[in-house]
Image (tube, rainbow, N blue to C red):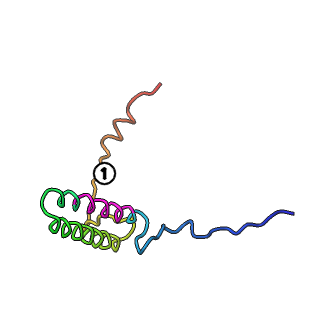
Amino acid sequence: MAKRFAVYKGLERPLVFKGFKGKFIYWGVGCLLLGLVAGSITMALVNMWVGAVVLVGSIVGGLFYTAGRQKGGLHSKSRSPGIYAHRANLKNLQAYAAKKRI
């Protein structure tokens, strides 16, 4: 008798973590790491309090930017306004037909 296993049906959906989906999870992690590095460098070079402000500001700002970009969709595409007409260049097709082929 064959064993039956439960099939995970969520494989076609993007990965979700704390409200961030798909590639935006990596964007969020990148913002966190960048904020930690920028804050620690500022704390070492300037002042502890200025570094703390830079740390919190860059992390919060980066996460808000990532959340805003996520609203555009997982696969954001540029949309050009207007109608574009492309000319057909049929002169080249006649040149190819005139060549003798072996």
Residue 54: name its quadrant. Answer: bottom left
Q: Number of callouts in the render?
A: 1
Task: Kindly state the secondary structure of the residue where label 1 is placed.
Answer: loop
Query: In the current view of this chain or complex, which residue is farthest to the top?
Result: 102
Whether residue 30 appears in this view of the structure is yes
Q: Is residue 30 magenta?
A: yes
**Residue at 57% across, 70% down:** 10
Residue 50: name its quadrant. Answer: bottom left
* 34 lies above or below 97: below
The residue closer to the viewer here, 36 or 3, is: 36
Q: Does the magenta stretch include residue 50?
A: no
- Residue under label 1: 88
Q: Is the magenta stretch mostly helix, strand or loop?
A: helix
Disc 1 crowd, CA 10 A, few/some/many (<14, 14-19, 20+): few
Amino acid under label 1?
Ala
**Residue at 27% across, 68% down:** 59
| Magenta region | 26-38
* 74 lies above or below 93: below
The residue closer to the viewer here, 48 or 95, is: 48
**Residue at 31% across, 64% down:** 32
